[in-house]
Every structure is written in C-alpha cells, then in structure tokens.
Image: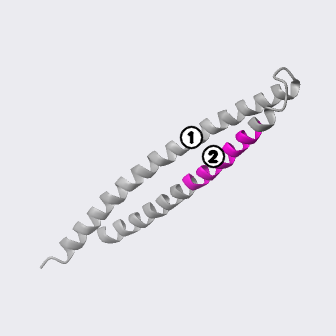
C-alpha cells in the first residue's frame, strides 16, 4: 500500500511543480512586457517639459509600473520558494518509494 500512496503523492507533486514553473514563466513574460512599457513611457516623457501636466502624469504612471514590478518580483520569489519546497518533497517521496520497492522485492 505504501508504494501506491507514494506514487500518487509523487504524481501530485510533479503536477504542482509544473504549475509553479508555468506561473514563474508567466511572471517572467509580464516583467518583460512591463519593462518595455516603462521604457516606452520614459521615451515619451523626454518630449515634455518637466513641469507640464503630461510629464507629471507620465511620472505617476512610471511610479505605478515600478510598484507593479516590485509586486511581480515578490510573487516570483514566493513561487520559487514554493518550487524549492516541492522539489525537496519530490526527492523525499522518491527516496521513500525506492525504499518501498526495495523492501517489497527483497528475497
């Protein structure tokens, strides 16, 4: 029975691992898009006088995008941390499964 349980647990852990990797990939893509948006705003902002309302509005938008970028970094760090925990659990579960196989087929 331990072999079946550890195999099911291992499959669930692999599914979690793939889900976390996918989320990290989405955040990476979002960061690249966000960086491009910030770059575009900076280029547009150089066309205006620093005291103009349009320049101030662009600065506010840049600040909001920077806050969003920090949130994305925090979220990615959380996902990477969870991914490391899942990897450790996969190693543990694989070891337990291997021990169960060895014990069951030992003559």
**Residue 31, percent from left and from top:** 63, 46
Residue 27 included in the magenta stretch of the image: yes
Residue at the far top in the pictured view: 51
**Residue 76, percent from left and from top:** 54, 45
Residue 89 appears in the figure: yes
Vertical position of residue 64 compared to residue 99: above or below: above
- For the residue pair 19 and 2, the one nearer the viewer reads as 19
| Residue named by callout 1 | 73
Q: Residues within 10 Å of mark 1 (few under 14, many from 20)?
A: some
The reply, left or right, for residue 87 in relation to residue 104 is right
Q: Single out the mark in the foreground, 1 or 2.
A: 2
- Quadrant of image for the C terminus: bottom left
Which comes sooner in the sequence, label 1 or label 2? Answer: 2
- For the residue pair 38 and 9, the one nearer the viewer reads as 38
The reply, left or right, for residue 3 in relation to residue 31 is left
The reply, left or right, for residue 79 in relation to residue 107 is right
* The residue stretch that appears in magenta: 24-41
| Residue named by callout 2 | 31
User: What is the spatial separation of the Cα atoms under label 1 and label 2, in whole angstroms?
Assistant: 8 Å
Residue drawn at point x = 66 percent, y = 43 percent: 35
- Which quadrant of the figure has residue 44? top right
- Whether pointer 1 and pointer 2 mark residues with C-beta atoms closer than 8 Å, the reply is yes
**Residue 32, percent from left and from top:** 64, 48
- Which quadrant of the figure has residue 1? bottom left
């Amino acid at each position: 029975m331990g072999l079946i349980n550890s195999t099911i647990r291992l499959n669930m852990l692999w599914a979690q691992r793939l889900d976390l990797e996918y989320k990290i990939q989405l955040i990476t893509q979002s960061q690249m898009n966000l960086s491009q948006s910030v770059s575009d705003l900076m280029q547009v902002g150089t066309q205006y006088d620093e005291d103009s309302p349009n320049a101030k509005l662009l600065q506010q938008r840049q600040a909001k995008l920077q806050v969003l970028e920090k949130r994305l970094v925090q979220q990615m760090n959380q996902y990477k941390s969870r991914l490391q925990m899942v990897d450790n659990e996969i190693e543990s579960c694989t070891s337990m499964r291997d021990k169960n196989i060895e014990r069951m087929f030992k003559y």
